[in-house]
Image (cartoon, helix red, strand yellow):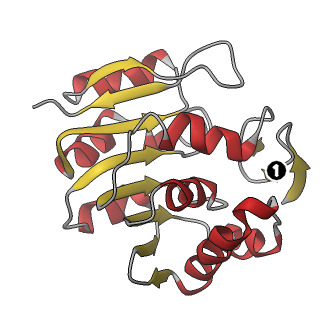
Amino acid sequence: MEKVKTADDSVTLYSDKYKETFHTMSGAIEESFKKFVEPCNLKPGMTILEIGFGLGYNCLAAIHSIKKIKIIALEKDKEVLEAMQDLEVLDKFKADFEIVKIAAKNLHYKDDNIKIMIILGDAVDTIKELNEEFDAVFLDAFSPPKNPELWTLEFFKDVKKLMKKDAVLATYSYARKVRENLTNAGFSVRDGPVVGRRSPSTLAFNES
């Protein structure tokens, strides 16, 4: 995995397996704040499901913004958890990123305010093992053409079962089929922020 610097001075990686970078080139950490954390309107005490822990930037943005939070993350690739240990972030994020690195190394982290648990395995399977209710979901898998199993109607139904009423799912994808699958799974789908691309991201609300 090759390091690639993005426009906000944060570094992402290029995946040889998926032939994509982990983040938009307009700003890796900016994307985590603007497309995931801020649209979900997080509050202290919330529980988040992250699908695709990756380099840990979404987790970083969440604990940087909300000081009392629980995050359960699903990640298939152990190698990326090892690769992110060598990444550096801007000084203002370093303390929080050290927490994320500990979580990635040990697959868990816990203090008085922050709890992080990472579950290794294929999310299609591991999501069925969860027994938790979530206030928000970050869906940050590789793109639908490269990682189609995490954008299906069946998978979205499994996600929705774990979400509290009025919980929100945030994802960067604007793909028509993704939005159709979310709608058919029972979500109310709306445009999310426009960050780094012409099209908006996607927000899906569990209103039932």
Q: Nearer the viewer, residue 85 or 99?
A: 99
Question: Would you say residue 162 is visible in this rendering?
Answer: yes
Residue visible at 55% across and 78% down in the picture: 103
Quarter of the image for residue 191 reads: top left
Question: Would you say residue 15 is visible in this rendering?
Answer: no
Task: Give the percent coordinates (x, y) of residue 181.
Answer: 33, 26
Residue visible at 23% across and 23% down in the picture: 184
Quarter of the image that includes the N terminus: bottom right
Quarter of the image for residue 13 reads: bottom right
182 above or below 126?
A: above
Quarter of the image that includes the C terminus: top left
Task: Give the percent coordinates (x, y) of residue 22.
Answer: 71, 47
Task: Give the percent coordinates (x, y) of residue 84.
Answer: 74, 68
Drawn side of residue 161 relative to residue 114, left or right? left
Q: How many marks?
A: 1
200 above or below 84?
A: above
Q: Nearer the viewer, residue 150 or 33?
A: 33
Q: Nearer the viewer, residue 99 or 108?
A: 99
Task: Give the percent coordinates (x, y) of residue 161.
Answer: 17, 48
Secondary element under disc 1, as helix, strand or loop, is loop
Q: Which residue is mark 1?
A: 10
57 above or below 22?
A: below
How busy is the neighbourhood of tag 1: few (under 14 within 10 Å), some, or many (20 plus)? some
Q: Amino acid at mark 1?
A: Ser
Drawn side of residue 23 relative to residue 114, left or right? right
Residue visible at 25% across and 66% down in the picture: 130
Residue visible at 59% across and 60% down in the picture: 60
Quarter of the image for residue 48 reads: bottom left
Drawn side of residue 74 relative to residue 145, left or right? left
Can you name the residue that lies furthest to the left here?
208
